[in-house]
Image (tube, grey):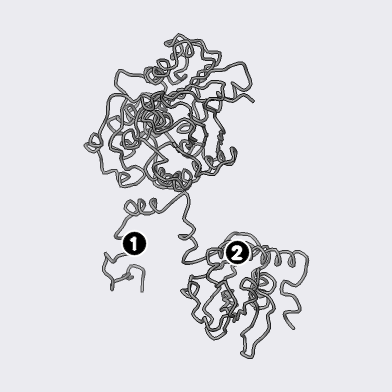
Amino acid sequence: MTAHEIAALPDLPADLPGLVRIETSDRHATTPIIMDMLRSVYPHDQVFGKYCTVNEYIDCPPDEVFRYLSDTRSLEEWTYSLRGFTPTDEDGLWLAYDRLGDSTEIYTRTVAHADARTVDYHCAWDQGKHLWMVYLMRVVDARTVLDVEGSVVLWTNCHHPFYDENPYPETAPADRVPWVGDFWDMFAAGHQLEMSNLKAICEYRWANNLPVTPNWMGE
Amino acid sequence: MDTVSLIDIAGYLPENRVGADYFAQFAATDRLADNIMFRAPKFRHHIASDENAVDMAERAVAPLTERNGAELISNVDILITHTQLPDVPILGTGGELARRMGITPEWVVDLHNGGCASFVYMIKLARQIMQTSDASTALIVSVQNSAGQIFTQSEVRTLAQSAVPGDGAGACLLVKSAAAPVLGLECRTYPEFAGDMTAAVDPPRKYWETGTGQLHIGFTESKIAKVFARGNRLVPEVAMAVCKQIGIAPDEIDTLVTNQPNRLFLRNWRDALELPAERHPDTFDECGNLFGAAIPVTLDIENRAGRIPNGSLVMMSAFAHAGDFAGAGAIRWGAAPAGGVR
């Protein structure tokens, strides 16, 4: 098939709402739409309300950062408040405590793909049956995207409805006051802080010829 | 450090009030008209054919003389002018204005940079001179006169950009006193953005050479996006810097007055400073883009309407050209009309 034989979107009406393509809305028509979207400042909710994304450059090779992140126990080191990781009876499922929630139990399963260097932490407070809090991370070779040695780490959380209401209240400790969703508006800042932890740890170890993934994690 | 106060302000708009239909009749298929950056104001004022820059300056200053007395004005130590399109290319309006007013200030400065933010820059320059010399009175004048001259040329008026500018002039009086203090000023030059605004003539020639093409401002789509993003950032940035300097939060600003290149900027700037529209008056629909005169003209109109009470906090903020300069200044207002309105 040659290029001129490509017929894009033959199955869609040209005036489909929400579809803006150069064939039906040229640059002159589209530029004002874009300009109207550009602001001096953006409300916090618009930027971090539905999706919370933080990014950081780390002066440490991407495979090293990926390997470190892909071990669930690294969360013990670079997160702000997840501590005391222990394996559960279920393969790959870890139990820890989120000290943000008065020593709340947090369950974590890590899904990592080395080819794409994606690391997804599937977590939940209180119970390990439904891991609905998902931390999506990707390590990118900085040479490819910034033309420098090192890594770029992309990290996104999606505002799952369970953040707004505990779906399993029966699993919560009776005397616990906060719910994880109470902190959603702090996630952007909190995650940036944790990303700084990750950066500091990886950069120090790499610069000082220490294993980025500490030996004890291999035990 | 001597305190410098802005004790009076005045504006002047040429009589010729031009509706949007004037440009609509000439509009070519210049699709920049669709661009929000160039959505036309309802009206703008154009300099008269027999009026020059010094005439406008004189007319802006006249109310200051009337209200503050010829004696004060005749003894000004500093005269700083900014003229968008000088009557003679090699000098501004200061000397001729002084001659007409019969004054001999020690300092006569024709300031030619600062563009839309030049009013703030002139205040800063005057304050600096006053704080480092015996000079105690300064007259600041801004004349914007391209709209009815450059932008009404037969080829240029067909362009979308031509419906936006307006002519006008503004002036203020500064004295060494604590009556209406200039609380803080922040002026920043961004050389990296200099040269992004160009005067275009087609076919190309030096603007003063005889030729066929008509001088206008060179805008391209890509340039507009860059300038827009810069402007979005710069005006709140320098205003915030002044807030920090004087130890206030942006929401303590009672009246924000900015330059007014288009409605989008106006919206974005007040959003950025988290101010409601009523605290950010503008004269865009009546005057269009007044460039360097926007701040004094808007302040004058609001002041005469009694909407800027003495003691209120006024913030001026603007950026110039394609982002090569930005300036902001805060004043504890003290120029309200004696009877409330004027």
Mark 2 and mark 1: span between their CA atoms? 38 Å
2 or 1: tag closer to the N-terminus: 1
Residue A21, numbered label: 1
Q: Residue at x 61, y 79 (%)?
A: A106
Q: Horizontal and vertical percent for residue B35?
A: 34, 47
Q: How many marks?
A: 2
Secondary element type, mark 1: loop
* Amino acid, disc 2: Gly
Q: Which residue sits at x=25%, y=39%?
A: B27
Q: In x, y percent, where is residue B325?
A: 52, 36
**Where is residue A210 shown, x and y percent of the image?**
77, 70
Residue A178 visible in image = yes
Which residue is found at the position 56% from the left and 80% from the top? A172
**Quadrant location of the N terminus of chain B?**
top right
In the figure, is residue A133 to the left or right of A80?
Answer: left
Q: Please say if B15 is above or below A128.
A: above
Query: At label 1, which amino acid type do we have?
Result: Arg
Seen in the image, is B28 located left or right of residue A128? left
**B200 and A48: which one is in front?**
A48
Classed neighbour count for the residue bearing mark 1: other residues with Cα under 10 Å, few (<14), some (14–19), many (≥20): few
Q: Position of residue A158 (x, y in %)?
A: 49, 70
Of residues B222 and B80, the one nearer the viewer is B80
Q: Give neighbour class at mark 2: few <14, some 14-19, many 20+ (Cα, 10 Å).
A: some
Q: Which chain is disc 1 placed on?
A: A
Image quadrant assignment for residue A180:
bottom right
Mark 2: secondary structure: helix
Q: Label 2 belongs to which residue?
A: A190
